Amino acid sequence: MIRDITIGQYYPADSVLHRLDPRVKLFGTLVYMIALFCFKGLLDLGLITVCLIALISLSKVPFRFMVKGLKTIVVLVLITALFNLLFTPGKFVIWSFWKFQITDTGIRNAFLMTLRLIYLILGTSLMTLTTTPNQLTDGLEKALSPLNAVRVPVHAIAMMMSIALRFIPILIEETDKIMKAQMARGADFEHGNLIRRAKNMIPLLVPLIVSAFRRADDLALAMEARCYNGGTGRTKMKPLCYDAKDRRAYLLCVLFLAAVIAARILLPFPQ
């Protein structure tokens, strides 16, 4: 299960998405998330599905590798679907027991929220799988650079996000090593009830937290030893620059959002 986490990982390939400017991918991800949580009809759902399939095909990232990341949110998806299914009032009650009831609206909301979560993980994973942490940092810093005028520490925010993304695969690997070492000593992480499993996680979490703090301290010392003092006066080895394909990608993102909004207005789900 630990190895199934794909968020923060980069998949090297030579694709159109890999070659796009990171600012375009950040904007496209934002547009995708807005579209994902504002659609209300079958037409805009179809548009989002076609867009997601097309982007996965263009990225040249194996679909099996992307779906692997969904295993980590199965519990979250089930809980979300269950709450929407049992606690959403509606016009037609299909089943009722005590304070729980299943209605037509509850079934629709459970389906939509489950679909939204799955699409959200797949869509946002595309950005990290096709963009290196350095590119994400540079793109985020460049996109938010106007906020420097109001003294927002844009470089520090971008650096923190970059370090956090870099630490995800490292901590996953560290967790896997500690888990295997504890299992070799007789620890059991897979059996027992929920409370017992939570107690069994203590031998895993304590050394993981200690290791994370140690790595953070080593990184801070290394940055200080190299006289790192923020983004003031720093230059880029590969400065970001838009070209024709980036401008076309911006246009496609705007057209996609406009199409989803138009479909929401023209053909919503029946109430």
Image (cartoon, helix red, strand yellow):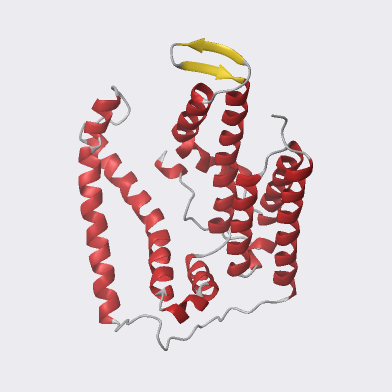
In the rendered image, residue 37, in percent from the top left (x then y), is placed at 60, 45
Q: Is residue 144 above or below residue 257?
A: below
- Check the image and name the residue furthest to the right: 266
On screen, 202 above or below 160?
A: above
Outermost residue on the bottom side: it is: 233
223 left or right of 147 in image: left
Which residue is depicted at the point 70% across and 51% down? 57
Residue 19 occupies which quadrant of the picture? bottom right
- Image quarter where the N terminus lies is top left
Q: Could you tell me which residue is drawn at 34 percent across and 53 percent down? A: 171
| The one of 43 and 2 positioned closer to us in this rendering | 43
Q: Position of residue 92 (x, y in %)?
A: 63, 17
Indicate the position of residue 216 as horizontal and vertical percent values.
27, 64
Please give the name of the residue rendered at 20% of the width and 35% of the height, measured from the top-left corner: 185
Q: Residue 223 placed where, x, y %? A: 30, 76
Residue 225's place in the image compared with 72, above or below, is below
The residue positioned 37% from the left and 59% from the top of the image is 167
| 212, 45: nearer the viewer | 45
Residue 11 visible in image? no
